[in-house]
Amino acid sequence: MVQVLVVYVGPRGVTVQTIPIASNFSNLGLNKNRGMPSQFNIDEMKWLEEGDVYLAQNQRRFNSDDLVIPVMGSTGAGKSTFINNILEALSPGSGERAIAEDSMESCTGSVAHYAVDLPPEISQGKFGDGRRLILVDTPGFGHSTLGNEEVLRRIAVWLASSYGIGIKVAGVVYVHAIWGDRMTESHTSGLGLLQKICGEDALPSIVLATTRWNIGIPECELKKREGELRDGLWKGMLDGSATMLRLDDKTDSALNVVKQIFCSMPGPRAEGMALLLQRQIVDERKPYGKTSAGQVTTRKRDGFSFAKLVAMFRKLFIPSR
């Protein structure tokens, strides 16, 4: 029971009255003791599914000062290969490796995270001792068995759970094969989701990395494709201070991408940031389907269904000429 103080101001003066009311602060996401937002708990989310990978509140092996870098991109672009090159450079004896795609077929179906200690030469003296890098491997956009809506949901579960226990993001790497048959549809939709996941404020901490430069295509053709990305599909993000880098299959190249993200982090302690998707789910308590990124996949799904229905109607009822 809560006592509410009500003050009436009228022609006869001021009247003060205390009224007891029953309340249910849990529906509002408030802490009834302090009037502050209650702690976010991913386990209470109705859109959580069995088998989801996320950071639970009791996982003490993760720290609030861990430096998280989610790695996203289309299927087969080289996300897991990039992560493995980092692990090989910073933790060669651990034996822990991401499952890499050997072709354009989808391989990574679940979100996975890999923790490694940061040596001084990588942190460049910007961070205090004992901080770790957390690389997050994600299912690819345009996955061969998962739709983008499900890919987004799995990514949202991990990002929301980590932010819910106080872990922020250092930056995001978006990996894209410079040449490939699957470029148009998966890359266009994936890039749109990336922007909605991150938000405009995160653009300076996003690295757009092109891979597969050793595919055997003449370099002049690859440079032409690179220019098309820079001046076309990626121009808006680059104008917003995102960074475009080439990424080859070498540890030094992978480390340069990580160093670029660290250089973009503001402040002497480089505390990281919350992505738009994280703020919308954790701070605003939106289900993932109501977030900016979730609405993109919903509109695409609904639009496809409607178009398919119209095509079926025309085929059945409108005679061909």
Image (tube, helix red, strand yellow):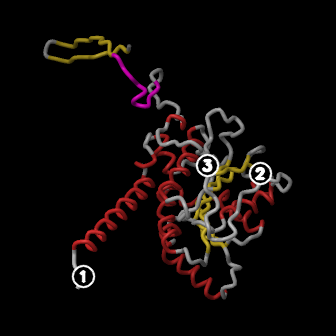
Question: Which of the 4 quarters of the picture holds residue 306?
Answer: bottom left
On the image, numbered disc 3 is attached to which residue? 272
Magenta stretch contains residue 293: no
Disc 1 secondary structure class: loop
Looking at the rendered image, the quarter that the N terminus falls into is: top left
Q: Amino acid at mark 3?
A: Gly
Q: Position of residue 165 (x, y in %)?
A: 60, 37
Reading the image, the residue beneath label 2 is 118
Magenta residue span: 22-31
Residue shown at 80%/52% (left/top)? 119
Quadrant for the C terminus, please.
bottom left
On the image, the x and y values in percent for residue 304 come to: 37, 64
Q: Earlier in the sequence, mark 2 or mark 1?
A: 2
Q: Which mark is residue 16?
A: none
Along the viewing direction, whichever of 74 and 65 lies nearer the viewer: 74
CA distance for labels 3 and 1: 59 Å
Compared to 15, does 268 lie above or below?
below
Q: Of the two numbered discs 3 and 2 on the same chain, state the one appearing first in sequence.
A: 2
Q: Which residue is mark 1?
A: 320
| Secondary structure of the residue carrying numbered label 2 | loop
> How far apart are labels 3 and 2 at the CA level?
15 Å
Kind of element beneath mark 3:
loop
State the count of labels.
3
Report if residue 268 is visible in the image: no
Marks 2,1: beta carbons within 8 A:
no
